[in-house]
Image: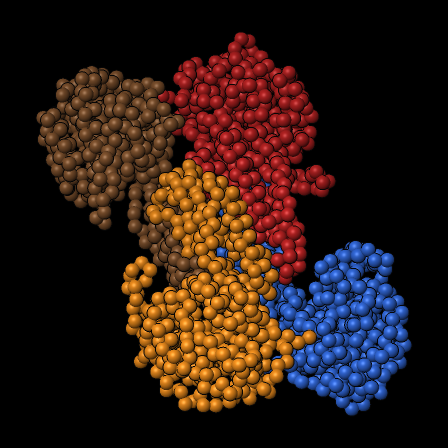
Chain colours: A brown, B blue, C orange, D red
Amino acid sequence: MSTQTETESGKGYAAAADILADLGTSQGEREELYKWFHQHPELSLAENETSQRIVDTLSGYGLSPKRVGDTGVVAVIANGEGPVVAMRADIDALPVREASGKDYASTATAKDASGESVPVAHACGHDVHIVSLLGACQAMAAHTDAWSGTFVAVFQPAEETAEGADALVAAGIADEIPTPDVYFGQHVLSFLPGGHVGTQVGPSFSTSERIRVTVHGHGTHGAMAYLGVDPVVLASSIVMRLQTIVSREIDSAQQASVTVGALRAGSRANIIADSAELLIDTRAYSTDVQKQIREAIERIVRAECAASNSPKEPEFEYYEHYPITDNDADATGRVHAAFDAYFGDESGELGRVPASEDFSIVPDSMGVPYTYWGLGGFADTSRAVGNHDPAFAPDLWPTLDRGAEAIVVAACAWLA
Amino acid sequence: MSTQTETESGKGYAAAADILADLGTSQGEREELYKWFHQHPELSLAENETSQRIVDTLSGYGLSPKRVGDTGVVAVIANGEGPVVAMRADIDALPVREASGKDYASTATAKDASGESVPVAHACGHDVHIVSLLGACQAMAAHTDAWSGTFVAVFQPAEETAEGADALVAAGIADEIPTPDVYFGQHVLSFLPGGHVGTQVGPSFSTSERIRVTVHGHGTHGAMAYLGVDPVVLASSIVMRLQTIVSREIDSAQQASVTVGALRAGSRANIIADSAELLIDTRAYSTDVQKQIREAIERIVRAECAASNSPKEPEFEYYEHYPITDNDADATGRVHAAFDAYFGDESGELGRVPASEDFSIVPDSMGVPYTYWGLGGFADTSRAVGNHDPAFAPDLWPTLDRGAEAIVVAACAWLA
Amino acid sequence: MSTQTETESGKGYAAAADILADLGTSQGEREELYKWFHQHPELSLAENETSQRIVDTLSGYGLSPKRVGDTGVVAVIANGEGPVVAMRADIDALPVREASGKDYASTATAKDASGESVPVAHACGHDVHIVSLLGACQAMAAHTDAWSGTFVAVFQPAEETAEGADALVAAGIADEIPTPDVYFGQHVLSFLPGGHVGTQVGPSFSTSERIRVTVHGHGTHGAMAYLGVDPVVLASSIVMRLQTIVSREIDSAQQASVTVGALRAGSRANIIADSAELLIDTRAYSTDVQKQIREAIERIVRAECAASNSPKEPEFEYYEHYPITDNDADATGRVHAAFDAYFGDESGELGRVPASEDFSIVPDSMGVPYTYWGLGGFADTSRAVGNHDPAFAPDLWPTLDRGAEAIVVAACAWLA
Amino acid sequence: MSTQTETESGKGYAAAADILADLGTSQGEREELYKWFHQHPELSLAENETSQRIVDTLSGYGLSPKRVGDTGVVAVIANGEGPVVAMRADIDALPVREASGKDYASTATAKDASGESVPVAHACGHDVHIVSLLGACQAMAAHTDAWSGTFVAVFQPAEETAEGADALVAAGIADEIPTPDVYFGQHVLSFLPGGHVGTQVGPSFSTSERIRVTVHGHGTHGAMAYLGVDPVVLASSIVMRLQTIVSREIDSAQQASVTVGALRAGSRANIIADSAELLIDTRAYSTDVQKQIREAIERIVRAECAASNSPKEPEFEYYEHYPITDNDADATGRVHAAFDAYFGDESGELGRVPASEDFSIVPDSMGVPYTYWGLGGFADTSRAVGNHDPAFAPDLWPTLDRGAEAIVVAACAWLA
């Protein structure tokens, strides 16, 4: 019982080898591109210079990129009969002050939503994603004799705020590109060895749901607690009880997470406040488990309010939501086989990643199978910091090559 | 605004002084009586030899004691016109192995309810109460010229199990004695200085309510908690939450207590059990607070069961109950004034005692005001152990004198 | 054993009656004074107009008031041989928007410490204290034939911030007034019946200690808690555990309170923060209990940090502190007897007040016995709101009379 | 990068097919054997009739079984040149009253360790394991022409108490059998579909560690908690805190479990006890995680004792221990490929099983790779009860066939 469909690896391998034969000649160009993007990071939905540079670069390859929404870009390379393969790269950066020590480190700043100036950096490696996809476009465009079908590049804004994939769908991406047979994505990661690629069948990146819970006490003088209802004790009871969702209620094979990231109540030692606020993040690898967690949180919060004799029902605001990234078994098997054939020991399993993505929203909106793989970014994983860390900055090489190669190899499993 | 009624201290003082003038002559007799009772302790409702010796002793004083129920004894000294004053002494001992080191320490044993042989000792000092009341009877009977009215002695069984006062009422004590104008009690205590007496207006000994709470989980394999409901986690949450009744819900001036004395759940590490049992003791100095605690416990237990998704309603069994001892202000003030006049600096305030008594059941059943005072039993309170401790054994002197004197002085505030 | 020293009530009563005989004639003047102070409330240490009006008024009585520090005022009425009695009134208001509905309600505003404009009101009744003491000064000054000795009025700033008594000591009050034989204070309260006065021997107002506790976690991604240490769980464990100080560790007769008024940790659902901050207020009626609580808090916080594997020692900042108000037994007994004699059923017991005062700092700095009594401010206590409530505004009458009378009656227990 | 070594499936398949060609002819004999074992269940280390029947049956096949220890049995089928393959079946039953409703249900009883009579049943399916291995022995012995090498059957006692594998090692099994090239085990399970086999590379059955934790309070009267240290509150705090090991400290991909199966403290509501006992079971799929859990438990327990001011260090008794079952990747891949080839869609992945085994002790003692697979026992898994349930009784067919077939197919991957 194998989960990996046999693919015509022979043909795909040969096509990819042809397409990638002269990749080395563009290394200087891609390094320059990468450093430019790295030094021009832009916040989510403000990727103006970034998207313009992408458009210019693609045009330089002889392609005809189109805008989708304000800062999304797509490019379609139609090359005769055959399947349609789409590849997505996310392009936004983060409000982080880079501390990588690189000589090309970002010193950029930008206004955030509240108008304040904040430092900005590609602390999640989306610049690697951009340059990898540009490199693949250049190679696919230059070697149309080696493959047939259609290759679509999708440069997506605002992944970090879970707004960009929705924005592409809202802007009508389905009308701008041919419907793909498969939709790819990749992410540079610190825990995979440098240059390695890793695939994963099924749930790979978790759901994430962010909940603002407000619970009500009854304010009073700090020395006369009996005249009120103490919301700090109520909130603390909730926090302790929420631990039991993961420890007792969820099958550990499901790998769920419930985190109270913020707890805020009261402002003075000697005044018992009226309410407390908890910001909760949940993670699950299935919508059933996500629902089970949501119900458990609501049940526990309501019950603890009852235990405290809270004078008012608690409030639940679900304010951010990432879907599951549930890689299609057939598509993933086919990519995995192609990676095994091409990269040998540098192809492996990704495992489940305790992070979330809005990647699946676009293919799900079109009813298209997808797979999302990992790309190792650091030769020495033991010293690599995690994504979003101020010091995050992947090795240039072989990362930029491998990111482009992985796209071409995966595409050729369909387009050879 | 004084809470203490002026009494005719002069007359009372003189009468008490006359009655107690020759108390010293019976010291040898009372010491022998005390040692006999101390060495013949009997468990609650089994005070057979004890009550027989009391009857014999009272008869020896020329009185006509009567049985009330199996082991209760009353003696009425009717001495002409005037008020009726009753004094209660409790007479039962405890299943404790005495470790006082006294040469007259108890080595007695008895069968307990389950038929097992247990050590028995007067670890709560009821032998002091018996001999003090016998001494007072002897003095009152010998000096009828110094007072007028009626003095009633009540020897009550089974205080330790909260059964004895109910038993006296059930056996018809109201028909066996004239209705008192005031009902007294006293207790030898380790925290009052030796020979001191202490009174307290209002709530003095707390209510006590004992509750058996059963909460239901759902048993399962210890490695598969998600298939069940863990009653150990549920019970532990309840225990932590119950702490907030005293810390947050009750006015601290009310001095309440909620103790989970026993928690029992499960029998094997790798099996999640079906239920857990908590034995809870509550203390309060008013029935309002007692009710508030009871409601809070039920609210918290039900809410925590809801938080755990318990499959079945919790069960509450209220299995033991002591009433409040709420000393009448006028009666207490009158006794306090008499004590001040007679004992000077050795008369003081008792304060609230964190213990419970069934003393008030008899006067409450007759609608009679009462007051209950404390009697210091140890010259060196810093080294005295608490009541019920295996090493508990009060100093013989001045304790046995002072116990008798206090009764006579208090009685003379009415009977002079 | 009485705690109340017999006083020469007869002489004191007669003197007070003489001094207060014509008090009614100044009602209009005192009402106008009160409304002026009520409508000119000033924040702590900014009592400029207030202190000037006090100085002017006292001068109008023929007295020679002196400044102590910036806004403190003292007036000494030296009237021949005899004891020295001092009376303190606190004079500052609160940053509260008055909502009493009175036609003389405050509409004042002021700049607070941060330079922002805030509403200001006498929501704690210090204006009653000022006018009562002015009234007493006027009466004492007008009837020097009825008493002998020295009467000292102390108008203290900044009670609300626990800074004013310290400020008087720092400004050398000991050099500005003769050393008193007794130091008095009073507070208008909502739970005593209107016009009633209440005394209390011993601990009457609690200590209050405010502690800022910072505990350290280790920040990480919200989905990867195992890489960090969660400070929200740590802080919540501490809150639950702190409940056991009052519920298990402190003798309930001591009436302690431990409140976590504020808990702040983290800012986003999906980020585990580096630290959490708790603001804790403790109350006790003895320095031993205060010390026991402080040690228990530190012990519990340190232990919970150890349980969480916290990477760094917790920090404790003790940032506000009120001493205990521990009324001298003899002085209080003497005042109580005088009140009983003069006010009859309107004199009673205050009980312990779950609030704190800096009153005792001045007499303690001079080694002088003190007593602090309560003054009922509302005819209908069942509808009265608590001190500091925006709606707080005592009945004008008999409050202003009774406040002045109480001072004169108490003083005459020494000065008659 | 494949984890499954290609095997010579062709040859192994042909050999297994030859060996199993006439398996159907022994169905009646195996059903009778199964029902006999099912109706003669024996407790751990008391498998006397069971082991005798195994010896007799093997002898009937023409083999020469040997005893290892009291109730262990091994049989070696040496068949020329080639690898050595060993297969283990565990043979003990459980103290459970069978409630399967089968007409061949067990009614057996036995004396347990304490001398009491208890019901006994094969509620974990070890009778399936015995008959499967006997069936495989019979087939291997009857068809020696189809394979070459050595086949070793190991009938192990006392798996349920984690004593049997240790007993075989102690009795010198290494001297009684040739050193295997691979060591197999299988278990009939309720969550795999009937007749299916499932393999798992790496950690498959968890470690289990059972810990008895005793924490010390200080006993006192239930109304005077402040005089003691409450062990019920201490134990409850520990239970709540232990939840955070799984919820916060362990990477969820590691799938750990920490269960407090039993909590026992105190016996009476109104007495605070001296100590509490917790029985804890932990599960992990690596010894690193097991160690991490153990350290976290000890850290938390010690810290909570410190938080409670416990007068005495806690005690930790590690009283039961199961090692991890960590299937060798190569051996498992080889068995998996053989199962895929032979059973097609009825071969699959087992996943991690939240249960523990002492199976690995024997191969680990000899430094031999091993793999342990699952065998589906119920056609309708949705209605199947779990192992150890009183109603547990697998379908006879195809279970008994498939259990024998799986052994032969796996063995032929080496012996063909």
Q: How many marks?
A: 0
Residue B26 figure quarter: bottom right
Extreme residue toward the top, this view: D81
* Quadrant in the picture for the N terminus of chain C: bottom right
**Viewed as shown, does residue B359 lie left or right of A301?**
right
Picture coordinates of residue D283, whole percent (x, y):
52, 36
Q: Nearer the viewer, residue C237 or A212?
A: C237
Q: Nearer the viewer, residue B94 or B111?
A: B94
| Residue occupying the point 39% across, 57% down | A267
* Quadrant in the picture for the C terminus of chain C: bottom right
Picture coordinates of residue C363, whole percent (x, y):
52, 68
Picture coordinates of residue C181, whole percent (x, y):
56, 73
With respect to residue C100, does C275 lie above or below? Answer: above
**Viewed as shown, does residue A217 lie left or right of C84?**
left
With respect to residue A146, does C216 lie above or below? Answer: below
| Residue occupying the point 35% across, 73% down | C52
Q: Residue C402: in sight, yes or no?
A: no
**Viewed as shown, does residue C339 lie left or right of A376?**
right
Residue B328 figure quarter: bottom right
| Residue occupying the point 66% across, 76% down | C2
Q: Nearer the viewer, residue A111 or B39?
A: A111
Extreme residue toward the front, this view: C80
| Residue occupying the point 70% across, 64% down | B191
Picture coordinates of residue D271, whole percent (x, y):
66, 57
Q: Residue A157: in sight, yes or no?
A: yes
Residue B107 figure quarter: bottom right
